[in-house]
Amino acid sequence: MHPDMLLIHTPKLTNRLGYTLNVLFQHVLHADFSITTDEQYYLQYGGAKLNYGSRRLGDGLFIKAQGLLSETSIEEQEPHAECRDGMWMMYPVYGRNLDLPFDPLAATFFLVTRYEEHLPHREDEHGRFSAAQSIAAQAGFLDQPVVEQWALLIRGKLLERYPDLTLPERHFRYIQTVDIDAAWAFLHKGTFRSVTGFFRDLVAHRDPAEAARRIRVLLHREPDPSDSFDYLIQTVRSVPGATLIFFVLLADYDEFDKPASYLNPHYRELIQHLGDYAKMGIHPGYSTIDQPAKADIETKRLDDILHRPTVRARYHFLRLQHPLSYRILQRAGIREDYTMGYADTPGFRAGISSAYPFYDLERDHETELLIQPFCVTDSTLQRYLRLTPEEGLEQYKRLIDTLRAVGGTFCPLIHNQNLSDLYGWKGWRHTFEQMLDYLKQEPTTSSL
């Protein structure tokens, strides 16, 4: 073993502990490390070392284990969250001569596996776990990427003790994700939907101006207001280092899924065009959770349109149920999921902004499916929180500042149609542009 590598000792290496160490050191800190259960080898090692167990060993950094990572079953938890000196902590530990007053590994595992969502809870009308039920929201740290803060705390403790230890710097990233629930407001919907939409504008909405606008768009006298795709490509690419991903809804038309048909030549041409300039993913339809075979069907549709395998997904309506949703994606061949976030509240559902692997808690093993959390949606700001565009911009700025401080990943979710002035979205395109300007004010590789 190279002496510059961090050596981690534990009396017993469990699947849970191995996974948590991978999340913190490989996926967050990008640090090389080795694990040993040999106490004598650990004591004789001359490089940087960390001991995770019930008692201190030698002069290495000591993190006292609370016990969660030695378990194999799913049990009721009392993680007890509190803030000390500006740092949120969970799973407190007690004893003399402790390097940390809590167990950040147990806390990380609890949050990133969404342990609490495997316990009895209430679901909303769409079968989702709401933010208000989470310990993060109840304690008050949902707006903080605490897992990354804990990882950096450990990093700092190691560097204090081992100043010659080489640990990579973390870098801020920006990933713009776009859900295409409806590619167009008026175009390419077929005669029946166009006619009923026209009368809905006149009768239900009592908006003759909107009905007239629909006619002008259908006659190609003005652009469709939801067609913001080239605009998105151009504006997002203006931010250095930005990544742009479109998630395409290809479900059959029903109560909650109302896309253009996957056979529609205009829709297929649009998807192919977007695939030339951005990364693409499938947006599994609303009923996929109840009829898992649909995930395979819809993924195959995108494969056929793009002539390449689909590896990314985000569920429509953010219908994330543990562990069912992720198992469905794995069976469909998906390797990256972007559903980890809340529909009703901004913040960090898993306490982390960086991508990390899905852990199947019921089966007690780490999987190859990578989870990239998002931290806010445009619909959350406008529909759930009822913020003005100006207030929405401040929310974006706060999240960006928070993530820059930890070298995290800012991954917002927007919808192409919400960049128009339809249905109460007037002014939000300008908010989006101001958000991009704010991202450009500081280097997108803000290192720590």
Image (cartoon, rainbow, N blue to C red):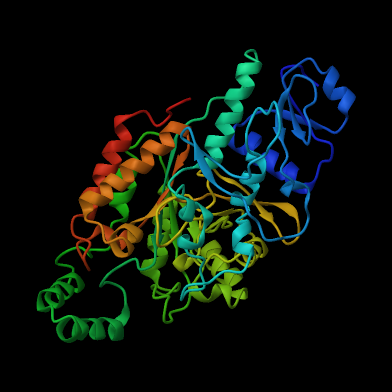
Front in this rendered view, residue 427 or 132:
132
Q: Position of residue 67 (x, y in %)?
A: 74, 46
3 on left or right of 224: right
Q: Is residue 152 above or below residue 388?
A: above
Image mark count: 0
At x 18%, y 59%, the residue is 426
Q: Is residue 154 above or below residue 365?
A: above
At x 79%, y 21%, the residue is 58
Front in this rendered view, residue 102 or 277:
102
Front in this rendered view, residue 27 or 182:
27
Front in this rendered view, residue 35 or 307:
35
Residue 418 in which image quadrant: bottom left
Quadrant in which the N terminus is drawn: top right
Q: Is residue 432 visible?
A: no
360 on left or right of 136: right
Q: Position of residue 299 (x, y in %)?
A: 56, 65
Q: Position of residue 162 (x, y in %)?
A: 66, 16
Q: Position of residue 425 (x, y in %)?
A: 22, 61
Q: Is residue 340 visible?
A: yes
Q: Is residue 242 above or below residue 385?
A: above
Residue 379 in which image quadrant: bottom left
At x 24%, y 81%, the residue is 197
At x 43%, y 38%, the residue is 403
